[in-house]
Image (spheres, rainbow, N blue to C red):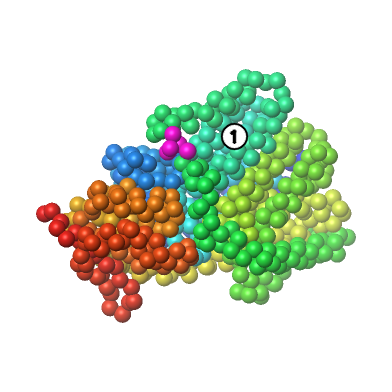
C-alpha cells in the first residue's frame, strides 16, 4: 500500500469527524523524520548565514562569558560577583566551562542544546493542540525569525548569544513545565507530574517574568489536583517543585536563590525610561494608537481571505490552497518595504487574549477550538493544554505590554505567543470556516503566504545587519564577527595583555575586554550603568574600588540618554568617578584614523610593579 502523500498531510490539519484535536488521527501522512530533517536543515542554514555574528562586543554578552569563567575558577555568585538574577543559568554555564573549557564556542554549543530543546517542546505542544503541520510551521517560524535574528543595532537578542541566559533558559523551562504536565494529563504518568514540578522549580531560579509565566501555565493543568482528593499527586508535584529551590538554598544561600525578586518588588529599575519605553509606557496614548492601528491592519488582513473563502464556498477545486498562497504572496510582495514587518506584532497580546477567551468559553461549553463538540479525553486535554500555553504566552508579553515586537526582548518573550498564533491561524480558524460551509483551505493558503513573507523579510533584515559585521574580534574559540566597535575592543584587549595588568575595570560597560584578555575585575561589579547603580549604589562601587583598586581602568564610550540619567560620572556614578580622578592618571587613548570613537585607558598613580 502506498504511503499517503503531501495532500493527506495538509488535509490532516482540518477538523476530524468528531471535531476533536486528537493526535492519533493525524500521525501518519508523511514520515515524521521528514519534519525533523527540514527543521535541522533550516537551523543549519540560519547558523551558516549568521555564523559567529551573534554577540555584541560591548553590551551585555561579555558579562555572560565573564561570570561563568570566574565561577569556573572558584568565584562565588552574589559574593565575589554582584548579581541580580537567579543562580541557575550562570552556574549551568560554568559547568560547561569546567567540562569543555572557557570559550565562546563552549557557550554557543551549550545554547544550541537549549535552542534544540525549545524547538522540540514547541513542536510537541503545537502538535498536540493543532496538528503536525501547524507544529512544523511554528518551529520554522521560531528558527527563521527568533532563534538567530538581529533587528536592532545591538546584537545579543538571539538564542545563541542571548543578552541574559536567564531569559532563554527561563522561557524554555516554563514551556517545558507545561509540556511535562500536559503529558501527565494525557497519560497519567506520575513521573511527568514530578518533572513538571521540578522544571518549574528550576525556572524559579532564572527570572521573575519567566517563572510567573510558567506558574500560570502550570496552574491551568494542575487545576484538577486542587479539586481532587489525590494528596499523593499534590505532594509529588510540590516536593519536585521544592527540590531545586531547597538545593539552591543549601548550595548558594537565600539571596542568590531569591535572585531578582527583591529588585523587582522594589520597582525602581522598572521606572527608568529605558524599561518604560520597552513596555510602551513612555507614551501610552501613542503606543495604544499604534497597537490599535496594527490591530485594524490584522483585521483587514484576515477579512480578505475570509471573504474569499465565502466566495469560493461552492467550488471544489483541489488547488485552492496553493493558488491562494501564490496570490496572497504576490500581493504581499507588491507591498514590499511599505510593511514594517518587525513592528507588525504590536497587537499580538490582543490576539492571544481573544484566543484564550474564546478557548475558555468553548471549554466551558464542552467544545474544541474549532467549535465542534469534544467527545474524547484527549480532546479535552488538548484544549486544556492550549489554554495553558495561551496564558503562559500572555504573561510573557506583559513585559512588552504596549510595545510587542519580534526583535529586542521579543526574541524570547514573543516566541510562545507566536507559536500559539500559528496554531490558531493554521488549524483552528480554517476549521471554523470549514464548519461554516466555506473553504478553510483558502484561509490556510493566505496564512501560508503571510508566514512565508513574515519570515523572509525578517531573514533579510538580519542579513542586512550581518553584512555590516566586517571586524573579527578574539582568537581561536573566542572569535566572533561584529561591527567597527569590535576593532576598538580588540585594541583594548591587546593593550591589556601587552601591559601585563593583573586587574582591570571597564566603565561603564564592556566586560568583554576582561574576558577576552582573561584579566579579572578585582571588585564584584561588572557593569556601571544606571540600573546597576539603583541595584547596588554608587557608594558601594566606590567602597569596592577603594578596597581592591584595579591596576588600570578602561573607559568605553556609552550613550546613557535612554536611561534618563546622563553620562557616567556626570549624571550618575559621580562618587566613583571622583575617586578615580584622584587615584588614576590618563595613559593613552585608543583611536582609529577617521573614526569618531575612542577608548581611554587610565592607570593608578603609584601602581605596584
Q: Which residue is nearer to you in this view: 166 or 147? A: 166
Q: Let me know if residue 257 is in the magenta part.
A: yes
Q: Percent x, y for residue 217? A: 64, 40
Q: Quadrant of the C terminus?
A: bottom left
Residue 432 against residue 71 in the figure, above or below: below
* Residue 499 in the image: above or below residue 226: below
Quadrant assignment for the N terminus: top right
398 left or right, relative to 480: right
Question: Does any portion of residue 18 appear in the rendered image?
Answer: no
Residue sitting at x 71%, y 55%: 351
Query: For the point 28% across and 56% down, which residue is it?
Result: 505
Q: Is residue 443 left or right of residue 193?
A: right
Please give the residue where the numbered disc 1 appears in the rendered image.
180
Q: Say how many tags the image has.
A: 1
Residue 403 percent across, percent down from the top left = 61, 61
* Magenta-colored stretch includes residue 143: no
For numbered disc 1, what is the local secondary structure? helix
Q: Residue at x 55, y 41 (%)?
A: 211
- Residue at 56% in and 39% down: 176
**Main secondary-structure element of the magenta-colored stretch:** helix
Instruction: Give the magenta-colored segment's residue range.
Output: 254-258
Amino acid at each position: 500500500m502506498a504511503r499517503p502523500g503531501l495532500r493527506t498531510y495538509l488535509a490532516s490539519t482540518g477538523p476530524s469527524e468528531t471535531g476533536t484535536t486528537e493526535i492519533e488521527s493525524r500521525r501518519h501522512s508523511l514520515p515524521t523524520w521528514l519534519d525533523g530533517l527540514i527543521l535541522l536543515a533550516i537551523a543549519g542554514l540560519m547558523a551558516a548565514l549568521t555564523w559567529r555574528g551573534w554577540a555584541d562586543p560591548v553590551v551585555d554578552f561579555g558579562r555572560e562569558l565573564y561570570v561563568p569563567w570566574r565561577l569556573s575558577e572558584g568565584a562565588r555568585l552574589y559574593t565575589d560577583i554582584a548579581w541580580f538574577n537567579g543562580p541557575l543559568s550562570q552556574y549551568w554555564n560554568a559547568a560547561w566551562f569546567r567540562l569543555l573549557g572557557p570559550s565562546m564556542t563552549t557557550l554557543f554549543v551549550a545554547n544550541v542544546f537549549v535552542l534544540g530543546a525549545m524547538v522540540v517542546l514547541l513542536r510537541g505542544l503545537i502538535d498536540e493542540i493543532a496538528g503536525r503541520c501547524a507544529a512544523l510551521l511554528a518551529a520554522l517560524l521560531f528558527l527563521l525569525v527568533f532563534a538567530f535574528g538581529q533587528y536592532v543595532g545591538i546584537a545579543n537578542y538571539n538564542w545563541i548569544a542571548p543578552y541574559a541566559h536567564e531569559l532563554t533558559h527561563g522561557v524554555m523551562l516554563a514551556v517545558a513545565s507545561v509540556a511535562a504536565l500536559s503529558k501527565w494529563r494525557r497519560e497519567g504518568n506520575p513521573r511527568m507530574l514530578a518533572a513538571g514540578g521540578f522544571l518549574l522549580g528550576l525556572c524559579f531560579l532564572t527570572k521573575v517574568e519567566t517563572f510567573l509565566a510558567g506558574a500560570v501555565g502550570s496552574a491551568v493543568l494542575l487545576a484538577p489536583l486542587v479539586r481532587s482528593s489525590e494528596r499523593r499527586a499534590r505532594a509529588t508535584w510540590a516536593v519536585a517543585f521544592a527540590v531545586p529551590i531547597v538545593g539552591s538554598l543549601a548550595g548558594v544561600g537565600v539571596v542568590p536563590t531569591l535572585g531578582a525578586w527583591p529588585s523587582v518588588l522594589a520597582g525602581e529599575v522598572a521606572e527608568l525610561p529605558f524599561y518604560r519605553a520597552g513596555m510602551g509606557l513612555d507614551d501610552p496614548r501613542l503606543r495604544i494608537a499604534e497597537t490599535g492601528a496594527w490591530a485594524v491592519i490584522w483585521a483587514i488582513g484576515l477579512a480578505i481571505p475570509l471573504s474569499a473563502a465565502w466566495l469560493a464556498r461552492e467550488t471544489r477545486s483541489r488547488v485552492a490552497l496553493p493558488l491562494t498562497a501564490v496570490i496572497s504572496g504576490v500581493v504581499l510582495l507588491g507591498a514590499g518595504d511599505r510593511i514594517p514587518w518587525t513592528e507588525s506584532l504590536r497587537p499580538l497580546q490582543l490576539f492571544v487574549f481573544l484566543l484564550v477567551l474564546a478557548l475558555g468559553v468553548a471549554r466551558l461549553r464542552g467544545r474544541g477550538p474549532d467549535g465542534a463538540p469534544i467527545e474524547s479525553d484527549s480532546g479535552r486535554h488538548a484544549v486544556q493544554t492550549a489554554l495553558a500555553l495561551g496564558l503562559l504566552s500572555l504573561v510573557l508579553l506583559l513585559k512588552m505590554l504596549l510595545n510587542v515586537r519580534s526583535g529586542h526582548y521579543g526574541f524570547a518573550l514573543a516566541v510562545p505567543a507566536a507559536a500559539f498564533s500559528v496554531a490558531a491561524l493554521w488549524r483552528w480558524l480554517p476549521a471554523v470556516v470549514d464548519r461554516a460551509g466555506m473553504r478553510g483551505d483558502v484561509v490556510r493558503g493566505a496564512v501560508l503566504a503571510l508566514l512565508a513573507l513574515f519570515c523572509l523579510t525578517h531573514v533579510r533584515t538580519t542579513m542586512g545587519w550581518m553584512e555590516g559585521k566586517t571586524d573579527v574580534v578574539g582568537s581561536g574559540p573566542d572569535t566572533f564577527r561584529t561591527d567597527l566597535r569590535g576593532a576598538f575592543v580588540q585594541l583594548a584587549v591587546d593593550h591589556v595583555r601587552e601591559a601585563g595588568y593583573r586587574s582591570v575595570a571597564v566603565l561603564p560597560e564592556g566586560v568583554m575586554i576582561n574576558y577576552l584578555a582573561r584579566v579579572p575585575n578585582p571588585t564584584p561589579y561588572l557593569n556601571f550603568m544606571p540600573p546597576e547603580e539603583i541595584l547596588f549604589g554608587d557608594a558601594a562601587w566606590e567602597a569596592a574600588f577603594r578596597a581592591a583598586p584595579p591596576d588600570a581602568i578602561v573607559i568605553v564610550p556609552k550613550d546613557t540618554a535612554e536611561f534618563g540619567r546622563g553620562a557616567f560620572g556626570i549624571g550618575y556614578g559621580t562618587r566613583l568617578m571622583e575617586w578615580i580622578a584622584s587615584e588614576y592618571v590618563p595613559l593613552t587613548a585608543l583611536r582609529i584614523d577617521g573614526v569618531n570613537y575612542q577608548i581611554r585607558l587610565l592607570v593608578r598613580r603609584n601602581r605596584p610593579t
